[in-house]
Amino acid sequence: MGWSWTLGTVAGTAVRIHITFLLFLAWIFGANYVSGGPQQAWSGLLFIVLLFLCVLLHEFGHIFTARAFGVSTPDVILLPIGGVARLERIPEKPSEEFLIAIAGPLVNIAIAGLLMLFGAQLGVDSLATIENAGAGLLPRLAEVNLFLAVFNLIPAFPMDGGRVLRALLASRFGYVRATELAASIGQWVAFALGFLGLFGNPLLIFIAIFVYLAASSEAHLVAIRAISQGVPVTTAMMTQFATLTPDEHVDAAVETLLRTNQGEFPVIDGLGRPVGVLARNDLIRAIKERGADARVGDVMTNDIPTVSNRRCLDEAFKLLQEKSVPAIGVVDAAGRLIGLVTSETIGEMLMLHQAMPAGTRWGPWSRPAGA
Ligand SMILES: [Zn+2]
């Protein structure tokens, strides 16, 4: 993620902090300063820093459990909405995902327990120092840790509770079906939260919208990833498409553009090998800026990621996401362009897949004939 700095490395995991988090701290300080002066500003800041220390410990609960199962964890990033620990992969066994997911909230419960024990011991003293601004700090921290545990256990993606639910379902229904079930349960939970929010806390409405959107995108991603493993890339490519050559003028390209409803035009050399890609918008911009005489080769994007037609679809899907390009070229053994994979072609294959009867579905568990 851009605009973030590494604070340090803990046991091989980089702890990063995003610029919006620093702005958030500045805002907390400023808002407290305005309403209560420097003393309140510092104690407000102290509270938030301690709170995020608890959030970080929560993330390290996930990280150390993941490590125990051999999943590497390159970094954790702090955002104003909380921490996000990046896991290199989701473990195959549902029981392992369950333990990784629940470890975070358990850390918060442990912290709350310790603070209450500690706070109870301080109970007599704190009566004497009630004037002290820091006196309520420990009970307040214990309280928010309990809140964090409960909030994260909401059974909806991307909360830990969503992953706990999926892991529980996955042992019975398989990973893809479990994700679908967990996602739709999550959306019902989001509806319920939003409904409650209407009558009380408006914050619940925001949480509900966030949870609702996140739940549907997670389910979509998992479905595509699972289905695209073990499926040849050729099943999700389009083979009918217009191409351009580098020496063509852009006004000729416009005619091609008008003839088709294609969004991106691969540019190929004399031997049929892809050398670049020209998107609809780039073409229109090129005409405005350089006139109709400009060559396609001078205005195209030179980098078109390709995969061999012998590879699996998940490789093309990964490239689409990592490079954030509109299309992936599929090439044959001689390097000639024979197809294009876009997010639409994958989406269409996915719809087809879902329309098919269960026994004939493609996926890691059953392969199309000849694949
Ligand atoms: Zn968590």
Image (spheres, rainbow, N blue to C red):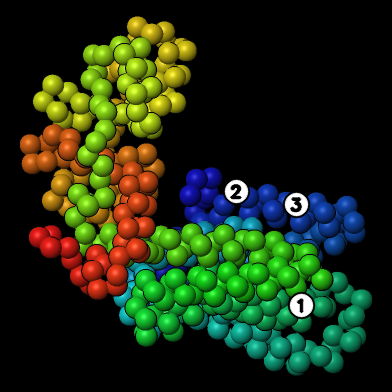
Q: What is the x, y in percent for residue 364?
A: 23, 68
Q: Callout 1, which amino acid?
A: Arg
Q: Are marks 1 and 2 in contact (CB under 8 Å)?
A: no
Label 1 – label 2 distance at C-alpha: 26 Å
Q: Callout 3, which amino acid?
A: Trp
Q: What is the x, y in percent for residue 351?
A: 36, 57
Q: Is residue 96 above or below residue 90?
A: below
Work out whether mark 3 precedes mark 1 in sequence or the reverse, and give the earlier one.
3
Task: Say which residue label 1 marks.
Answer: 140
Task: Say which residue label 3 marks.
Answer: 27
Task: Say which residue label 2 marks.
Answer: 19
Foreground residue, 192 or 89?
192
Classify mark 1: helix, strand or loop.
helix
Q: What is the x, y in percent for residue 262?
A: 36, 32
Circle 3: is it few (<14), some (14-19), or many (20+) Cα within 10 Å? few
Circle 2: is it few (<14), some (14-19), or many (20+) Cα within 10 Å? some
Q: Residue at x 89, y 87 (%)?
A: 127
Foreground residue, 44 or 166?
166
| Figure quadrant of residue 29 | bottom right
Work out whether mark 1 precedes mark 2 in sequence or the reverse, and give the earlier one.
2
Q: Residue at x 11, y 25 (%)?
A: 271
Circle 1: is it few (<14), some (14-19), or many (20+) Cα within 10 Å? some
**Quarter that holds the C terminus:** bottom left
Foreground residue, 141 or 40?
141
Residue 12's disc is none
Residue 94 relative to residue 29: left or right: left
Cβ of disc 3 within 8 Å of ligand 1?
Answer: no
Q: Callout 2, which amino acid?
A: Ile
| Figure quadrant of residue 211 | bottom right
Q: Is residue 127 visible?
A: yes
